Image (tube, rainbow, N blue to C red):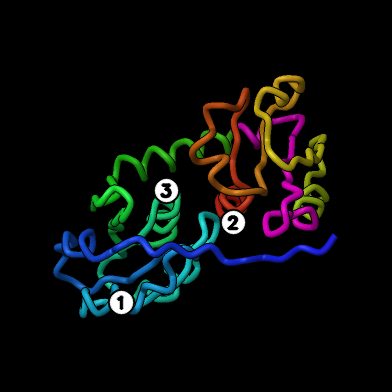
């Protein structure tokens, strides 16, 4: 079966929400694929800014690339897990401009600390776990089976199992009560926004590896 990938862009008006941005320092501009084509227009509205580019919920490397050139970051888009990832990866304040709700807010430090504590709790559970479940999406663009298998080989003192899925059914996970901790290799939103739907602690593989290397 041939697959045709078409980038989904939005023509939502970003003018009004950008006018609400009052930060006086230098901003690093970040967004997702839906709005990346509007970054140059946004920069015209915010002259004291630098274009960082497109980010993913699981990859904020473009933010890190300009971290030493800006005083703060501005994420334009929907979904809090993107700016949260930037806040975790950098040492700067992160503002979130949502053109769909026409709101601008700074990501609260309390939210960042809450996520850090949840990640650390899942990490500590991972260290003491006997059985690990590794979640792998079959969707193109999210499929990390090679990375999952490579990680699985490092688990010398734990039993581990790879769970393949297209659309994750959280209820199905309850059929595996002996899994002590879930490792997510699919969309990072699963472990950030859907963590309450799990019967055991869950952590993104990227977050786990970051904590293991500290």
The magenta-colored residue range is 125-147
Locate the N terminus and report the quarter of the image it occupies: bottom right
Residue position for label 3: 79
Q: In which image quadrant can residue 17 be found?
A: bottom left
Q: Quadrant where the C terminus lies?
A: bottom right
Residue 137 part of the magenta-drawn span: yes
- Name the residue that disc number 1 marks: 41
Q: Taking 70 as reference, is 87 above or below it?
A: above
Q: Nearer the viewer, residue 72 or 212?
A: 72
Judged by depth in the image, the label closer to the viewer, 3 or 2, is: 3
Q: Quadrant of residue 110?
A: top left
The residue lying at 75 percent from left, 56 percent from top is: 147
N-terminal of the pair, mark 1 or mark 3, is 1
Q: Is residue 105 visible?
A: no
Q: Secondary structure at mark 3?
A: loop
Left or right: 47 with respect to 173? left
Residue 21 coordinates in the image, percent (x, y): 19, 62
Which residue position is annotated with label 2?
213
Q: Residue at x 34, y 75 (%)?
A: 68
Which residue does the image show at 52% across and 34% down from the upper left?
121
Determine the residue positioned at 14% across, 69% down: 24
3D distance between C-alphas at marks 1 and 3: 21 Å
**Mark 3–mark 2 distance (CA, rounded to whole Å):** 28 Å
The x, y position of residue 88, in whole percent, is 42, 54
**Which label's residue is closer to the chain start, 3 or 2?**
3
Residue 48 on the magenta segment = no
Q: Is residue 161 visible?
A: yes
């Amino acid at each position: 079966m041939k697959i045709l990938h078409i980038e989904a862009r939005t023509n939502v008006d970003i003018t009004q929400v950008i006018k609400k941005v009052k930060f006086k320092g230098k901003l690093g501009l970040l967004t997702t694929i839906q709005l990346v084509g509007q970054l140059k227009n946004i920069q015209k509205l915010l002259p004291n800014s630098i274009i960082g580019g497109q980010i993913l919920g699981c990859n904020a490397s473009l933010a890190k690339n300009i971290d030493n050139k800006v005083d703060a970051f501005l994420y334009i888009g929907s979904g809090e897990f993107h700016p949260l990832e930037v806040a975790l990866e950098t040492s700067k304040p992160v503002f979130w401009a949502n053109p769909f709700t026409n709101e601008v807010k700074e990501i609260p430090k309390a939210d960042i600390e809450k996520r850090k504590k949840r990640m650390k709790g899942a990490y500590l559970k991972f260290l003491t776990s006997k059985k690990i479940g590794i979640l792998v999406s079959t969707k193109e663009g999210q499929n990390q089976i090679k990375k999952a298998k490579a990680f699985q080989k490092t688990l010398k003192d734990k039993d581990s199992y790879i769970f393949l899925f297209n659309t994750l059914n959280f209820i199905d996970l309850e059929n595996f009560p002996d899994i002590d901790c879930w490792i997510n290799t699919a969309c990072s939103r699963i472990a950030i926004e859907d963590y309450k739907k799990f019967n055991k602690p869950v952590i993104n593989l990227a977050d786990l590896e970051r904590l293991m290397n500290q």
